[in-house]
Amino acid sequence: MTVTRRQFLTVSSALLASGALSPLRLGAQAAPAAPVTKFQDLRRSAGIFTGRGGTIGWLITPDNTVVVDSQYPDTAKICLDGLKSRASHPIDFLLNTHHHVDHTAGNGVFRPAVGRIVAQRGEPALQRAAAAQAHTLPEQVYPDMTFSTNWKMVLATETVSATYHGPAHTGADIVVRFEDAGVVHMGDLVWNHLHPFIDRPAGASVVNWVKVLEAVLNEDPADTVYIFGHGKASAGVTGHAADLRHFRDYFTAVIEYVQRGIRAGESKAEIAKLPALRGFEDYEAPAPPRVSLASVLEVTYDELTAPERPA
């Protein structure tokens, strides 16, 4: 089978997201720089940890500790040590917002200190498939508690819940809420002022992503503090409803632009030449994975022209 350059780039993007094309696997000789890490309090007993990978959310009360996402093993160890210094009791739950390696590779570090690892029902299979492709199956630590649509745990002084709204960034993204604190972890459902990675091979949907963001906005109080998986340096990885609306509008603009191109008979390559999306010129390409406006437009074109395209 002949592989086109575009097909190679599409597969390469998916492998980057799963960790298969890490610098070490590409043969880079330079040792990676030590990660810069930080704990930050947000509201009441909730906060975030930033290091290398998707933002970790945490909740520490006098009786319970809950963690959302685990980054990579090196920063997971730093995070776990920091949590142990803040809480004298074990971690009750670790929730994975989705399967990508920068959110789950640290599961093994957390595993001895965690009661249960929780994720959406489809997440373990996606994690396993990505690991098989990256040849990292022996390193995987999977969720041992899964759910279909809703999960809730009432703790001594806090209620923690998780919701699945359907495919978006992947086919199994969840939204995690620290309900009493008014803090919501979005995982990679929000890339704050960054062009997002859309993992179509893992079941992503640009069309439904808009619906997911709208559903979240309708469910949460106006003063909710949101945690984002990734964010432009100047925009940060926390925000409010206005940031979700802005990201929703970004996708709406992407879909409308691609639809106009399709109706005009333009090819995918022609549509992807757009240098900047009007009204969202400040969006940057994250690294890693290397994502661009062109890749977002191409994936959206593929979805809108696919026979199984969502209504």
Image (spheres, grey):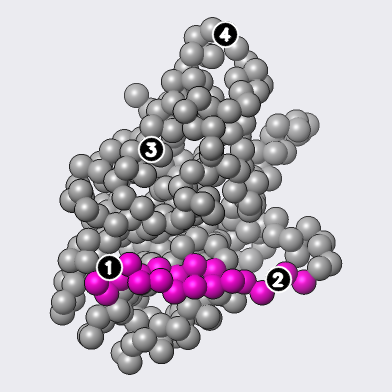
**Secondary structure found at label 4:** loop
Label 4 neighbour load within 10 Å: few <14, some 14-19, many 20+: few
Taking the magenta stretch, the answer to whether it contains residue 46 is: yes
Q: Which residue is mark 2?
A: 33
Specify the amino acid type for callout 3: His
Seen at 76% across and 33% down, the residue is 5
Label 2 neighbour load within 10 Å: few <14, some 14-19, many 20+: few
Span of residues in magenta: 31-51
Res 43 label: 1
Quadrant, the C terminus? top left
Res 246 label: 3
Whether residue 295 is situated above or below residue 113 in the rendered picture: above
Give yes or no for contact between labels 2 and 3 (Cβ–Cβ under 8 Å).
no
Give yes or no for contact between labels 1 and 3 (Cβ–Cβ under 8 Å).
no
Provide residue 296's location: percent of width, then percent of height.
55, 34
Q: Which residue appears farthest toward the bottom when viewing the image?
A: 88
Specify the amino acid type for callout 4: Gly
Specify the amino acid type for callout 2: Ala
Q: Which residue is mark 4?
A: 265
Provide residue 279's location: percent of width, then percent of height.
47, 28
